[in-house]
Image (spheres, helix red, strand yellow):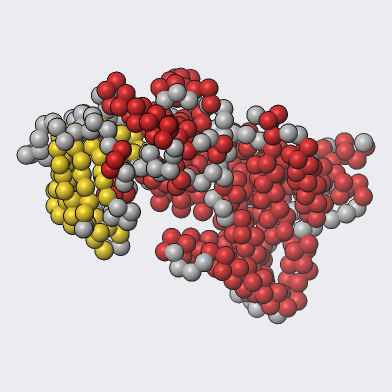
Amino acid sequence: MDKILGMDEKSCIDLKNVSIGYYGIPIIKDVTFSITRGDAIVLLGQNGSGKTTLFKTILRIIPPLQGNVVYNNTPPVRFGYVPQSQSLDEIYPFTALDIVLMGTFGQIKPFSITPKKNRILANQCLMDVGMLESRKKLFSELSGGQKQRVLIARALAASPNILLMDEPITGIDADAIKMIIELIAMLHKKHSLTVMMITHESFNIPSWINKTIQIRNNEVVVENAR
Amino acid sequence: MDQLFEIISPNFLLRNSFYAGLVIGLVCPQVGIFFVLRRMLLMGIALPQVSNAGITFAFLLHTLGWHFFPHVESEKAMALTGSIIFTLFAIFLLAILERKGKGFTENRIGLTYAIAGAASILFVSWNPYGHSEAISLLKGEIVTIPDVYFWSTLAIYGVIFIFLTGFHRNFMLISFDNDMAVAMGKKVIVWNILLFLIIGIVISFGVMAVGPMVIFGFLLLPAITAKMITRGIFPFCIISSVIGVFAAFTGFYISYRFDLPTGPIDIALLGIIFFISCLIKIVIPKNRTH
């Protein structure tokens, strides 16, 4: 839905009385909050609480059961999406570079070879996340932390203004968590990206996060951290 | 060597069979890579059998006097129609059941294979007219392919090949990361339907030309072999078709030279290439392939 009257100029996405779920069965009802440009948001909740469903509703992957998700189109919202790396099948023989190039698919016409500028962009994104040297490695051969960094690079290759990350620090070791958190902080500052990430590890919330959205007992609680 | 020159000569009597084999060797692996990557290998076994059931059913109807097309080559046109209808019906039914998550995938596909196999035999046993044609298809005897068949197969496979290569990125993206594709604004349902249509048409035409066993072999073996010996999606796709064309060419030559059935020779060759690739994979240390 395009920009509508009454929407805050600064907010890029507004959820108004949204119910989310599958096959008509709501998981969470009456979700109302705004995502403002420059926000750094953490979405917290236990396993199965509906974090990923809420994420997918914001990404337009799942339609809301009720209510409206309103996107401010000046400038248009461009999502960078980082899924849980475990959700991707490792049977695909993609190299790290192949994966990152996917982020540019929206800009490439059919029946054409990959333009040089897209390759340069993909390499730049790999460099930003510190994975340029591993660009020829198969995705399936990378460690959990490296996979997350490649997926973040893929999201960056789509030239997003909102970066949505589904559990980017789950299932990886402490050093990799620190590296990923620092990387996200850098991207948030350097690219002025609006960042939203899911986690169920509340002890790992960095200090630069300005908003936490918590799902408790099928209800959404929004807290401004600063 | 003389026979090799004879085969590639434009006036070669069996040129339709030879070129049809090469086209199948080129295009089927490009469809097969989606069977392998989407973990639908079993579907690759069941669907050619379903297509075969459609063909034998059409032969039966023809014998019973139900002609839906002009009588010239009518049984072939009916057989092709039967093949396409049965295959597309099965592929979309299996896809819908998969999407709804009803039961286990293996059960559904196993059941489809068993029923289609049994139906094929029953349709043939009730119909002595179509018996020899159906048995020839089952054995994969790619000997005589009429001009009309050859050119229609060439046209259909050509269009499909251009489509698969031109929209390769979209087909890969929706297969690998459906959510990302939706987030990027791709019409995932349309692309999935298109991919299943392509699979259905390739199998229908292929089974009519060379039989279910050969199509099954060309769909899966080149892609499985290429997956083992390549790194990266681009080499994987290229090598799949290279293996397919090589097996079709060499298989036809061996078959012509030693008077053996072409289909089984092609499949045996694909099997040999697979085992040689396995050996290479074992013998060459992993770090040398990096």
Q: Position of residue B33 (x, y in %)?
A: 60, 45
Residue at the image point whose x is 62% and y is 38% from the top? B237
Q: Is residue B273 left or right of residue B230?
A: right
Asked whether the viewer can see residue B206, the reply is yes
| Up/down of B172 relative to A132, above or below | below
Q: Is residue A79 left or right of residue B217?
A: left
Residue at the image point whose x is 53% and y is 22% from the top? A133
Q: Position of residue A46 (x, y in %)?
A: 30, 52
Q: Position of residue A166 (x, y in %)?
A: 35, 42
In this rendered view, identify the residue nearer to me: B251 or A128.
A128
In this rendered view, identify the residue nearer to me: B158 or B34.
B34
Asked whether the viewer can see residue A112, the reply is no
Question: Which quadrant is home to the C terminus of chain B?
Answer: top right
In this rendered view, identify the residue nearer to me: A42 or A203.
A203
| Up/down of B140 relative to B253, above or below | below
Residue at the image point whose x is 77% and y is 49% from the top? B271
Residue at the image point whose x is 32% and y is 23% from the top? A186
Question: Which quadrant is home to the N terminus of chain B?
Answer: top right
Q: Position of residue B12 (x, y in %)?
A: 83, 43
Q: Is residue B93 left or right of residue B280?
A: left
Q: Quadrant of residue B64?
A: bottom right
